[in-house]
Image: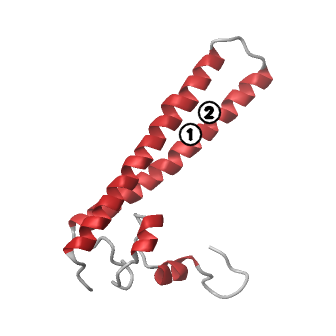
Amino acid sequence: MTRMSKERQERLIELLLAEKRRLWGEVRRELFDNVGGELQSQYEFPQDVGEQGLIDVLEDTGMAVADIRRQELTRMDEALGRLKEGRYGLCVECGAEITEERLRVAPYAPCCVSCQTRREGPASGPGVTL
């Protein structure tokens, strides 16, 4: 396994922490500003069954978005753990450095593009999807 330079490690740390701050900001906005305020104002007025169904869909959608963000934050925490162990930015499969371009797009990526492609690719040829 290769060891990354201090300069690269510092750049990647900032990238990872910036992405985590951005995700937390999105979660707060989504849950408290958008979904919470809209749903609370809707509940203040009497509703028929159709309106209640629409509110339920909006609430479920808000919760689904929040769950996606929660999963992303969990991956960010795992990446921070790899960082503390000195393994952040290194592929967990082959040990090669993950390109900074990839980490800018997905700062929590555990694998290089090649290994991730193998993870997501068909296991036994055409017609099989994961």
Residue 117 percent location from the top left of the image: 54, 80
Q: Are marks 1 and 2 in contact (CB under 8 Å)?
A: yes
Q: What residue lies at 33% left-to-right and 77% top-to-bottom? A: 90
Q: Is residue 23 above or below residue 3?
A: above
| Image mark count | 2
Q: Which residue is mark 1?
A: 63
Q: Amino acid at mark 1?
A: Met
Nearer to the camera, 64 or 10: 10
Query: Mark 1 packing: few (<14 Cα in 10 Å), some, or many (20+)?
Result: some
SS at mark 2 in the image = helix
Q: Amino acid at mark 2?
A: Glu
Residue 33 percent location from the top left of the image: 51, 29
Residue 94 percent location from the top left of the image: 37, 85
The numbered disc on residue 59 is 2
Q: What residue lies at 56% left-to-right and 24% top-to-bottom? A: 37
Residue 58 location, quadrant: top right
Q: What residue lies at 49% left-to-right and 84% top-to-bottom? A: 114
Residue 42 percent location from the top left of the image: 65, 19
Q: What residue lies at 39% left-to-right and 77% top-to-bottom? A: 98
Nearer to the camera, 119 or 31: 31
The coloring applied to the image is secondary structure
**Seen in the image, is 101 located left or right of residue 2?**
right
